[in-house]
Image (spheres, grey):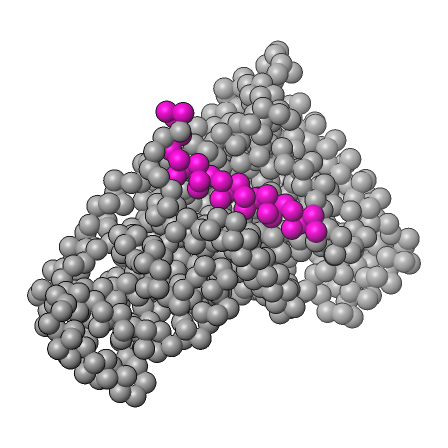
Amino acid sequence: MKADIRVALVGNPNTGKSTLFNVLTGLNQKIGNFPGVTVDKKVGYSKLPDGRLAEVVDLPGTYSLYPKSQDESIVFSVLADRANPLSPDLVIVILDASNLKRNLLLYSQVADLKIPVIIALNMMDLAKKSGLTINVDQFSKNLGVPVVPISARKIEGIDQLKAAVSYANKFALQEDSIDVKAIAPGLIDRISEELNIDNPYFALQLAHQHETLKFLSPEQSDRIEELEKEFSFHSQKAQGTETIARYNFINELLYDTVIKPINAHDETVSNKIDKVLTHKIFGFVLFFAILLFMFQAIFSWASYPMELIADGFVWVQNSLHHVLPVGPLTSLLVDGVIAGLSGVMVFIPQIAILFAFISILEDTGYMSRVTFMMDKLMRKVGLNGKSVVPLIGGFACAVPSIMSTRTIENWKDRMITIMVTPLVTCSARLPIYTLLIALVVPNRNVWWLFDLRGLALTGMYVFSLISAVVVAWVFKFILKSRERGYFIMELPVYRMPRWNNVLYSMYERSKSFVLQAGKVIIAISIILWVMASYAPGDRFEKIDQQYRQPQYTKTMTPDSLNLVISSAKLENSYAGILGYVIEPAIRPLGFDWKIGIALITSFAAREVFVGTMATIYSVHGNADKMESVQQKMHSAKNTQTGQPVFSLAVAFSLMMFYAFAMQCASTVAVVYRETKSWRWPAIQFAYMTVLAYVASFIAYNVLK
């Protein structure tokens, strides 16, 4: 898609930048990586009033052009390097109208780079509610740039912002914020002269950041280093001088343009709420109560739609078996593909409810409070408060959570966070847990309030967090680093969740889950069906000959005989042979050869376990008596003991295995991508597999 103008969105965290990006671009957006790095890049397209198409780039949130993380370093690289393929024609700086003093520091730095700027004065509704009066016209006049009041959440002022973008090239460049040359006069002049630079603030930033900027050649970087020594340039001292000058400018600007209410220093409503929600005791109790409510809801609210989906798949399988001719293709479609898909599709309601809760917690601002509360606890185990974001995000998926560790400046903190994040129970484990819990945990209430199954699921999630913290504490002593981590975070004000955003999140995450898991499950279901439907040599023919003998045909009903024959064929198939090969290794965990097959196939993705069990038991079952995977697993019996295969001990042994095992190829790939070495994913895979085996062994032998 060819755009007429490229616009970059720049702003502090929690200023509504991502919300504005979504409003401007709608569904017309794509996510990739910035050139040469693994930082996420969000690009979208927006139609302007004059008919032109604008390419909108959402740059990572940052408080300053002086980066403290890989994400933040992207902002200056994109804005300053005119050769960068994402270099913008125009920058929209998003300011939180209720917190202008802090936000304007970044604006003044961007403005001094002399790229055309428009200010989007966001959250005007909150500023008015708090009694702030902003003279927008005077504000714009003093800065020399267009200032557009908006409320991205309420979609107010967006048309005016687009109109400002349309006419941006007709505005003069903004006024200087400070006298940049006064900070390092001789050095700035020499860098400008030798590198042919016409912007003094760009030259000053090169002095600060030349060692990390990829668009400078080694020779240019070395020359800047020589000039720094020649002029006795001290980077931190210069930053301090610059920051003081900028805040002097900001204070004068706000004095002329912003009127605060008389009671501005009174305690805000958000602070009053925080006294309860972030309390060192009640805060944790409330957080646990919210988690408990979430998992109760996942079981109780999703039960009816899950039954409808399960019954629908059973009806489809029955109908296709009666309509389609008997043969391998019908069996492949019904017993392979559809049976495998049914095992995952049935969990869509639970996945949707989980993501709805996560979206609400993020939208209201509560998730930031959880991060703040956990900081002290995290430090005791070798992490910091920023590690909580990936860990809590791990409830959804480990892959984006591991990518979000880039905001952690300290190498040791970041590596430990990467190593333990996959231990947190992700949405892919949810189908396994809910299936196994439904098999062995009674469906009854405790104290007339809590569902026993919901309590069991809550226990698995809490156990995963405790496991991650304990393993992090162990890594604290293994990994060595002299860096000291620190935690700086702004707590956003509490807001009502945007319900359209919650619904969109439910839809997008559920669709992503189905598409990603569905592709893997269809592929594995086909392979598994072939392995379970065919055998080496003439094994199947010998089984048919054996069970045609009168001692079987005269003493057994046709249904019983068919079940015995299908069981014998499954055991002698390629899948059965593979299962029996690994069975001695997993028998101490209470697993049989069928579960062994599921363990192997689910190395691609954890949720494939359910689809594999559905396929295995469909191939093993009677085509005339289609049942849901849960019913089939419930009625499965051990051929030697006659006892149920999925006893309490086996079910919890399996859950312990999946609680620890690295059964996710995508996570392995993203750890390699983030660490740029196979060493770390190999260590992670090894320690998690050992933990899984030991925990599973203990659970089975204690409960059996």
Residue at x 40% of width, y 35% of height: 452
Q: Nearer the viewer, residue 439 or 175?
A: 439
310 is higher (above) or lower (below) than 373: below
Quarter occupied by residue 565: bottom left
Give the quadrant of residue 139: top right
In the image, 577: left or right of 60?
A: left
At 53% from the left and 41% from the top, the residue drawn is 462
As drawn, the residue found furthest toward the bottom would be 537
Q: Is residue 228 left or right of residue 441?
A: right
Give coordinates of residue 81: x percent, y percent: 63, 60
Q: Position of residue 539 (x, y in %)?
A: 28, 83
In the picture, the quarter occupied by the N terminus is: bottom left
185 part of magenta stretch: no
**Left or right for 194, reference 55:** right
Q: Residue at x 42, y 66 (%)?
A: 596
Task: Judge by depth and name the residue closer to the eye, 416 or 83.
Answer: 416
Q: Position of residue 107 (x, y in %)?
A: 63, 40
On screen, residue 517 versus residue 33, left or right, reads left
Q: Which residues are magenta?
A: 447-474
Q: Is residue 67 visible?
A: no
Q: Position of residue 629 (x, y in %)?
A: 28, 55
Residue at 49%, 44% (x, y): give it: 460
In this picture, is 124 found above or below 330? above
**Residue 699 visible in the displayed image:** yes
Indicate yes or no whether the magenta region holds residue 453.
yes
